[in-house]
Image: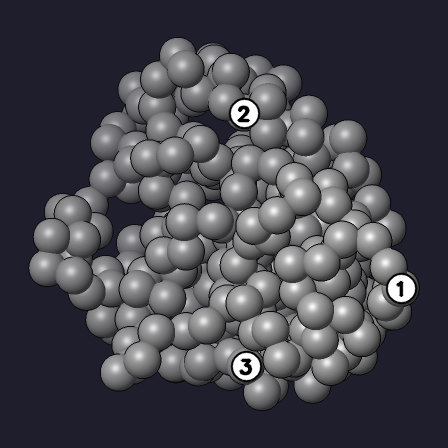
Amino acid sequence: MGLKIAIGGKGGVGKTTVAALLARCLAADQSNKVIAIDADPVANLAAALGIESGEPITPIAELRDLIAERTGAQPGTMGGFFTLNPKVDDIPDRFSRERDGVRLLVMGTVKSGGSGCICPESTILKALMTHLVLFRDDVVIMDMEAGIEHLGRATSASVDALVIVVNPGARSRAAAEMIRKLGSDIGIKRIVVLGNRVRDDEDERLIRSALPDFEVIGFVPEDDEVVQADRQGRRPYERIAEAPAELHQTAARLLALRP
């Protein structure tokens, strides 16, 4: 069965690293087909997954020929006539990169007209997200920016959970409240918190006391391996089985959210 999880958090909390590690934990069970979606304008999920190649991954929003073919309009144009229901079902297999059972798609951003524009690029991105969330049985882990711009209302209602990554500290509440409101506004029904870089029981208590009205789905401990991997430009935990038990437990709790 499919599982659709959006992961959000303010800059610097380790959201992308957590998204990559959870995707790898879920893919370790080979019965799960995992697609990781990089929907953050600052696209770093490929590096966090250890997906490397000689040429960079072209985001879907920048595939001009594909967008023109599927929508009937040139990217960068506004107004006019183009299809609002383009064919996208072949895109995940054609334009993704895979490693260790995790297939990565990089969405990219719409560079003209604002986040709410009706243009060929935004149309194909939203159609692709709708297809991934509603019509595939994969486990889909979405590394989102705070605004969750690629998720329309109809699609958002079918996301199983929005996971807000926070660090210990009083400022966690303001960021979590903002992201929860954005998620609620577009129809995500279950919104939970995941504490990251947690050093001890006191850090856990700090997060719980700062966010008493949030469901906490788990805590990921502070670990030198993540710091060293970042410094060395590699993914942490080359063998994902060696990642902290708390991370695997969180992945299991996410699987329990399947409808």
Check disc 2 and report the residue beneath it: 176
**Counting other residues with Cα less than 10 Å from the Cα at mark 1, is it few (<14), some (14-19), or many (20 or more)?**
few
Residue at the location (41% across, 73% down)?
A: 57
Look at mark 3 in the image and give the residue it sits on.
95
Q: Amino acid at mark 2?
A: Ala
Counting residues from the N terminus, which is met first, the one under dot 1 or under dot 2? 1
How far apart, in angstroms, are the residues tagged by discs 1 and 2? 39 Å
From the viewer's perspective, is the residue at label 3 or at label 1 nearer? Answer: 1
Q: Amino acid at mark 3?
A: Phe
In primary-sequence order, the first of circles 3 and 1 is: 1
Mark 2 is surrounded, within 10 Å at the Cα level, by few (under 14), some (14 to 19) or many (20 or more) other residues, namely many
Which numbered disc flags the more N-terminal residue, 2 or 3? 3
Residue 132 in view of the camera: no
Q: Residues within 10 Å of mark 3 (few under 14, many from 20)?
A: some
Q: Position of residue 140 (x, y in %)?
A: 61, 65
Element on which disc 3 rests: loop
Q: CA distance from mark 2 to mark 3?
A: 33 Å
User: Residues under labels 3 and 1: Cα distance?
Assistant: 26 Å
Say what amino acid the circle numbered 1 marks. Answer: Phe
State left or right for residue 228 relative to residue 34.
Answer: left
Occupied quadrant, residue 205: top left
